[in-house]
Every structure is written in C-alpha cells, then in structure tokens.
Amino acid sequence: MKYRYMGRTGLKVSELCFGTMSFGAATGEETAHRMLDRFVEAGGTFIDTADVYSNGVSEEILGRWLERQNRDDLVVATKFYGDMGPGSNDGGAGRKHLRSAVEASLRRLRTDYIDLYQVHVFDDATPIEETLSTLDDLVHDGKVRFLGASNYAGWQLQKSIDVSSMRGWERFSCLQPLYNLLDRETEWDLIPVCQEEGLGVIPWSPLRGGWLSGRYRRGMDGPPEGSRAENNGGGWPEAWDVYANDRTWNVIDTLLEVAEKTGGSPSRVAVQWVKDRPGVTAPIIGARTPEHLEDNLAAVEQELDPELAGRLTEVSELKKPYPFGLLDNFKRR
C-alpha cells in the first residue's frame, strides 16, 4: 500500500480508504473487526464512517476495534448531518446539532479526536458562517484535526473555502464525492475546485453499488438477486431503471475486456481506474465481506496499463452540458 498526502496538507493517508457503511447492517461486528485487521495488515491506515451509518452502530463497532489499536497510526474520518433523533435540532449543520454530533461521535468511536470531520450534505437552511465557524472552533478545541465536505455542488464548495479563507478559519482539506466509471460529473467542476484549492478527493462508491463488480452483464433483464439495484434500488440510488442503458453496458463490456487482459476482476480494475484519476487521493472501498475486501485490496498490487485505462476513460466519457462543454473549447492550459 502506498501513501499520499491529503490535498495540500501534511497528512498522509493510504491510497485506499476503508468505508464502514455496512458495519452493523450487512456486516456483523466480528467480521467487521476481522476486515479492519486485514486492512491494516495490508498497509491501510485510512478509515471512513458516519454517524448515520446504522444509526451510530458503525461508529460503535469501529470504536471498540480502535481501543485495541495504536490510535496515532490511523486516520479516522467520520461525517455528521443526518437526523439522529426526534428533536428539531437533531440534524443539519447548525451549531447546536454540530456540537452535539461531534461529542456523540467521539463517544461512539472511543477516541479523543477525529482526524477528518466531514459535513455529510450541504445545509441550505443554516448560514454557512455558522457551520464553518463552529467547525473552526472544533479544530482549535482539539476535537478535530482536519475538515471536509461530502455531497456538495461546486459553488457550495468554493463558497465554503472562500468564506473560511476570508475569516481566517480552518478550511476544508478534503471532498468526498460520488465518482466512478458510470458517474463522472464530479470532473466538471468539483475536482477542478479541489485541484485549484488544494483539497484531497476521496470518492465514494467506486463500484457504483455493485454495477462495476462483474455481476452485471449486457442482456440481463433485471438486477442480480440480493443486489442494491433489486426492486428499483430499494431506496438506493443505484436503481435498475437509472443505470440499465446502452452507455452502462458499453462501459461494462469494456471493463470486462480490460479485466480479462489484466487477469484481474472487474471490480479491481474499476477501483484502479478511480484511484489513479487526476486529483484523487484515495477511493473508499465499501467491502461488505472479507472476500470483497481481498478483491479490493488487489487494486494496489499493480498499476493499470495507461492504454487500458484510456479505453475505460474514453468509453465512459459523458457529454458535458453547458457551460462545461463550451469552456473546454477555450482552454488555454
């Protein structure tokens, strides 16, 4: 496992991040701890969770494992925002909830500090200054080391960075966006903002909920049994009727061909492609089983041939809407 600086900070993280959304749901505690042990054995240091994952249980499972580790060897990230109770201030990014949320996460994680604390979703109901000033206070209090955002639009991210810079507050150091071979809109403005402003990028869902794992093939008339796309997604965004189209099958056809040429699995190749995209620090692998984890870890064993990576980039290219397509015609560097 190699290590990369997170954006323009001095913090080094492993080139894969272990996402724990399945902990407490599809993955029980004993299996989760075994997978965390294996991830660290393979050189992994970067672990991501969120307070809403299994309504806090994911953080609790991770916390009980953390107690047995050398805490300073690990980079632990979590997120806040979602409703964590029936109260009117039990969600969002306002000061009252934010202060309560960080204390609750620290208790569940059984740690004195969080390495990377992220706003899970942009809060359009709370003044941005309220959120950012409170996050700055948490850094100065020593409860949080670095700040990040997830699921922001380009203008929301840029405004957050600008307001923090003008006020002398701690800025975001990282963005956690959706990014994979099927979802490349992040390249239009979010990744350029991160590159210009020095933010790390840790993409979630590099396999798009299993669509890029090799289980989906052209000619299928429905999703695999037990998949997240089954029953129109069951509330998940990977719904069958969203992704079952010619572009997806063209991408999957090419992914299968590239995997065969490399001797690896489609999921390994899909993770490799994201890992080495411009601006990316570490994709988040959300393995649910030890077998899935082993397959994902194989993504760091070798680099994807540039020619094969180029084939995947070309087949998955999205037509850019205005103004992104127009602006490409006027690029000078």
Image (spheres, rainbow, N blue to C red):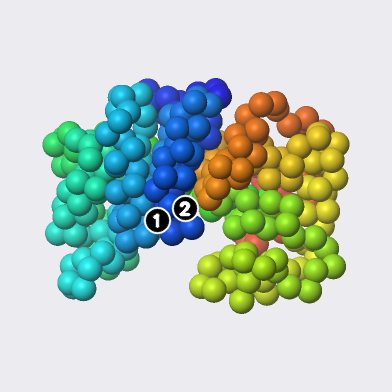
Q: Where is residue 8 in the image (x, y as percent from the top left)?
A: 41, 28
What residue is shown at x 54% (from left), y 74% (from top)? 234
Mark 1: amino acid: Gly
How dense is the environment of label 2, judged by Cα within 10 Å: few (below 14), some, or many (20 and up)?
A: some
Q: Position of residue 24 (x, y in %)?
A: 39, 56
Residue 113: which quarter of the image? Answer: top left
Image: 144 above or below 189: above
Image: 253 above or below 236: above
Seen in the image, is 1 located left or right of residue 58?
right
Q: Nearer the viewer, residue 304 or 326?
A: 304
**Looking at the figure, which quarter contains the N terminus?**
top right
Mark 2: amino acid: Thr
What residue is shown at x 69% (from left), y 53% (from top)? 212
- Mark sitting on residue 24: 1
How far, Cα to Cα, is label 2 from label 1? 6 Å
- Quick one: SS at disc 2? loop
Identify the residue position indicated by label 2 in the image: 27
**Looking at the figure, which quarter contains the C terminus?**
top right
Q: Is residue 162 visible?
A: no
How dense is the environment of label 1, judged by Cα within 10 Å: few (below 14), some, or many (20 and up)?
A: some
Q: Where is residue 315 in the image (x, y as percent from the top left)?
A: 79, 51
Q: Which of 246 and 290 is in front in this view?
A: 290
Q: Which of 127 and 12 is in front in this view?
A: 12
Seen in the image, is 113 located left or right of residue 156?
left
* Residues tagged 2 and 1 counted as in contact (Cβ below 8 A): yes
User: How many discs mark residues in the rendered view?
Assistant: 2
